[in-house]
Amino acid sequence: MNERLWSFSGGDHGQWRVTSVTAITGASLAMASQLDIINGAPIRPFVWSLQGVTSNERYVQQDEKQKLVAVQQGLGRASSTQAALIPIRKNAAWWAFTQDERRDILEAKSRHIEIGLRYLPPIARRLHHCRDLATAQPYDFLTWFEFAPEHATAFDDLLGALRSTPEWAYVERETELRLQRN
């Protein structure tokens, strides 16, 4: 089993109740009543299933990583009863850039890491890469967020800040799923 592989499957089973599915850019996912998250391949019937792997940090520099590690908290906190899954696919122009060019857009121009730091520790997240899988996926990244209900407005602010950056000009498909823990 690949311990880095995670499956997010929409259907009628799961730890999370889907409260909304919104197409931000491009085609949406079909509505499902529940979201099942498992470490590995999906095991139950589903309406749709997205897979991604956890990986090394690709655009974070050492000083930024130290700042993130110092304040971020893990997933699964009892108070974090709300969540969001945000799958994103970037366009061909993004992937034509070298990694250092993508880093320049992501942080020097968009301040992605700096923006994220403003919302830690109340909002926890884990990034999953989809392009590393042998089977083509409909998205490039799956970002999983968890937070307490009193931090929902801060989460909305985080999304607004990120979506207003130059980096988001390269997003060709983005879906936002909001969830409540069962």
Image (cartoon, rainbow, N blue to C red):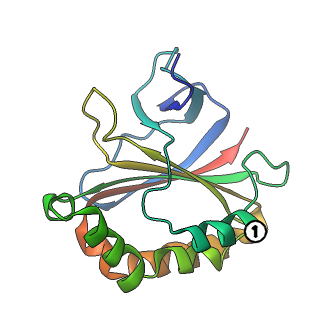
Q: Residue at x 32, y 48 (%)?
A: 140
Q: Which residue is mark 1?
A: 71
In this image, 87 relative to 37: left or right? Answer: left
Number of marks in picture? 1
Circle 1: residue type: Val
In this image, 45 relative to 121: left or right? Answer: left
Residue 182 drawn at (x, y percent): 73, 38
Query: Which one is in front, 145 or 134?
Result: 134
Residue 15 drawn at (x, y percent): 68, 33
Residue 132 drawn at (x, y percent): 34, 37
Residue 83's place in the image compared with 76, above or below, is below
Residue 24 drawn at (x, y percent): 35, 63
Q: Residue at x 30, y 69 (%)?
A: 100
Query: Which one is in front, 148 or 100?
Result: 100
Q: Residue at x 58, y 30 (%)?
A: 36
Residue 111's place in the image compared with 141, above or below, is below
In this image, 104 relative to 59: left or right? Answer: left
Query: Which one is in front, 10 or 50?
Result: 50
Please rate how many residues cluster around mark 1, counting C-alpha atoms within 10 Å: few if below 14, some from 14 to 19, many from 20. Answer: few
Tell me the element at label 1: helix
